[in-house]
Amino acid sequence: MATSTTPAGNRPRSKADRAYEYIKEQIDAGKFEPHDRVLAGPLAATLGMSGVPIREAIQRLAAEGILSIEHNVGARVAVFDGQAYRDGMESLAVMDGVATALAAQQISTADLERAEAYNDQIIALLDDFDPAQYSALNAKFHATLYSKCPNARILELVRHEWQKFANLRDPALNVDEVRARATVVEHQKILELIRTEASSAEIEQAARHHVLASLQARTDVQSELLNTESV
């Protein structure tokens, strides 16, 4: 007798999935602010489930960098301090550079056109700059390029690093209009390298430099602020 199976994509959501989605929605909506504790007990009562799926959801969110787990405190909404931001950006530069270079061998003309469309939308934002919209479009631009990476492990790692920055809530670390204007030029350079079938090393270097340039721009802004305050 044949056994019926349900495709993985059609499986009903588990309680842990529901808890994960609820907590993430609350964070995205600003109901949980940076540093706020995320307690399993109240969440279990709100969602009408035991603490087990709540804790599973919290562990998943912690693995994605959205929450941090502190000894004797529990889960808090994660915050990037200066060193964590630098560490994250340096890791992202490496992962994104490698993934984009590997993906360049697999990417289609349609993918490149889609990425260019996202970059065009960023250009349209520049005269009335919105950091949140910029961040969303920038993430889509890069995901379009690296998503064709044939190495599953590298793809997992780069997605994980980008996810951390998708949940960044500190306004002090937002990209400003000056950096955004440089970003669109760097995006165009990466697209041109892929279109002209440049070497993997050239593509990787351009993608890595692009991320590190954003880190340097933010470092320069922070240094200027410190110098101004010390005067």
Image (tube, rainbow, N blue to C red):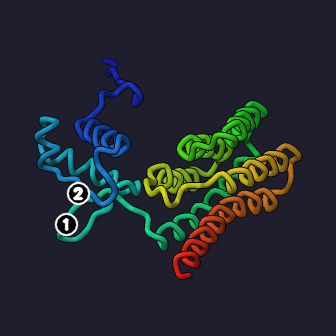
Q: Can you give x and y, in whole percent of width and height, for residue 163 in the image?
A: 48, 50
x%, y% of residue 195? 84, 43
- Image quadrant assignment for residue 205: bottom right
Residue 10: percent from the left, percent from the top? 38, 25
Would you place residue 15 above or below residue 6 in this image?
below
Q: Badge 2 local density, few (<14 within 10 Å), some, or many (20+)? A: some
Name which quarter of the figure residue 106 lies in.
top right
Q: What kind of residue is marked 1?
A: Val
- Name the residue type under label 2: Arg
Residue 111 in view, yes or no: no
Q: On the rendered structure, is 197 left or right of 174?
A: right
Q: Which residue does the image show at 57% across and 75% down from the upper left? A: 228
Residue at the image position 62 percent from the left and 45 percent from the top: 138
Q: Quadrant location of the C terminus?
A: bottom right
**Residue sticking out furthest to the right:** 196
Q: Are marks 1 and 2 in contact (CB under 8 Å)?
A: yes
Pointer 1: residues within 10 angstroms few (<14), some, or many (20+)?
Answer: few
Rendering coords of residue 151 (x, y %): 61, 52
Looking at the rendered structure, the secondary structure element under dot 1 is loop
From the image, tell me which residue sits under label 2: 37
The residue beneath circle 1 is 73
Seen at 12% across and 35% down, the residue is 48
User: 124 or 106, which is in the foreground?
Assistant: 124
Determine if residue 189 is in view.
Answer: yes
- Label 1 or label 2, whichever comes before in sequence order: 2
For residue 75, what is the image quadrant? bottom left
Q: 130 or 54: nearer the eye?
A: 130
- As measured in the structure, the alpha-carbon distance from the residue carrying label 1 to the one carrying label 2 is 8 Å
